[in-house]
Image (cartoon, grey):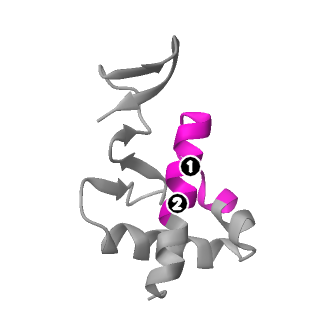
Amino acid sequence: MADKQTLARVYHVVMSWFVKTGRALHFTELATEFGVDADTAIELQCDMLEEIDGPHWADPGSGLIACFDPFSNMPTQYRISVDGEQKWYGE
């Protein structure tokens, strides 16, 4: 398992990506952010999701982040708008 500082950086990157783009980053994008291969990025993502509290999870089949509190990567009835821009969904 990665150290706590690395996991905190992974959390920050994932949350920042959601805020900026309205969606969760793909693990290959996480790999680019950290300068690692895709397998290592998946491990980092899994370690981070296991370590933090709250409803955060990835799809077991694809490894893609599905829910990252308070955001949902899948459309829901909970639409989040900021300054008239709606690009987020809540869980």
12 lies above or below 4: above
Q: Name the residue: 60% across, 61% down.
A: 27
Name the kind of residue labelled 1 in the image.
Ser
Q: Name the residue: 61% across, 79% down.
A: 40
Q: Are marks 2 and 1 in contact (CB under 8 Å)?
A: yes
Name the kind of residue labelled 2 in the image.
His
Judge from the rendering whether residue 16 lies leftward or rightward of residue 68; answer left or right: right
Judge from the rendering whether residue 86 lies leftward or rightward of residue 27; answer left or right: left
The residue where tag 1 is placed is 16
The residue where tag 2 is placed is 12
Q: Name the residue: 59% across, 47% down.
A: 17
Report the span colored magenta. 11-29
The Cα–Cα distance between marks 2 and 1, rounded to whole angstroms, is: 6 Å
Q: Categorize mark 2 by other alpha carbons within 10 Å: few (<14), some (14-19), many (20+).
A: few
> Which labelled disc corresponds to residue 44?
none
Judge from the rendering whether residue 26 lies leftward or rightward of residue 90; answer left or right: right
Image coordinates of residue 13 in percent, x first then y, are 58, 58
62 lies above or below 50: above
Q: Residue furthest top?
A: 84
Secondary element at image label 2:
helix
